[in-house]
Image: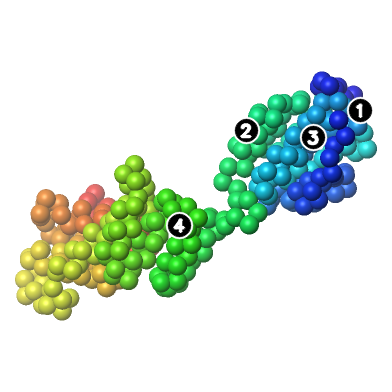
Amino acid sequence: MTIVEQGSGATPQAAPDLIKETTTHSFMKDVIEESRRQPVLVDFWAPWCGPCRQLTPVLEKLVRAAKGKVKLTKMNIDEHPAIPGQMGIQSIPAVIAFVGGQPADGFMGALPESQVAAFIEKLTKGVPAIGEPNIAEILKEAEAVLAEGDPAGAAQIYAEALAVDATNIPALAGLAKCYVTTDAIEQAKQTLAMVPESKRNDPAVKAVQAAIDLAEQAQSVGPVTELEKQVAANPLDHQARFDLATALNALGKRKEATDQLLEIVKRDRKWNEDGARKQLVQLFEAWGGTDESTIEGRKRLSTILFS
């Protein structure tokens, strides 16, 4: 393989945890497997390459500054020509970024430090530094805890995420949802008020807002038993049936709430300016698009509307 030098110092000792030399034998472990945890830069170089001796210290400096968001692996192509040969490396220095076990980006030649820094910044966007909390993992844990029926525990975890990023929209929406779940409606509203106006159409934010609206509606209706008596006495009392659906939803009885609103749609689609259908849509938004009650409710509503 003929290698062309891209242009024309000893390289300082690298930190072993972030920067290392690799071989043909260890390439799979050092690069492919490691890149599944965070991006890995592979610096293809040779001792006789002047531009390589210029670029490598820049790479090492910037990789150290990234504090674990990216690692650097150097490969001497004279000693280990198989991998660069397979990858079609025809000139050095060549830097290839691996992400998720695959080549993702790269550049050729000894670029200025500012350009290399921009390359690394783009590559590591959203990747946590060593010791830095991983907000994505925190949010995932909070969602799981909330799904298990522990809103207080989930709220604490969402608060951890907000301690790292006070403007994180999923964390704000999640915390507000915890408050709604525990009937702390005012706290939910105060939390959601922290979301910028430009982010109010975020699906998670809209879902919590819908849940807050429904909870406030539920506070204004009577007890379920009284509403059930009213509906039984007069099946055409759509307002009582509507209020019953609201109360049932507040108790977590989603199917029963859906049944009551669908009954109104069947009997009088135009009642209260299509109010029953609109309320169903608000329920679906609050429950989430993937919720079984939403999926089944939408099917049943479609059957009524388009039959």
Q: Are marks 3 and 4 in contact (CB under 8 Å)?
A: no
* Element class at badge 4: helix
Q: Mark 2 and mark 4: span between their CA atoms?
A: 28 Å
The residue pinned by badge 4 equals 162
Amino acid on which disc 4 is placed: Leu
Q: Are marks 4 and 1 in contact (CB under 8 Å)?
A: no
User: Of label 1 and label 2, which has the lower sequence position?
Assistant: 1
**Which residue is located at x 40 percent, y 60 percent?**
174
Q: Mark 2 and mark 3: span between their CA atoms?
A: 16 Å
The residue pinned by badge 1 equals 48
Residue 97 lies left or right of residue 140; in this view the side is right
Is any part of residue 209 visible from this angle? yes
The residue pinned by badge 3 equals 56
User: Of label 1 and label 3, which has the lower sequence position?
Assistant: 1
The residue pinned by badge 2 equals 118
**Which residue is located at x 60 percent, y 55 percent?**
132
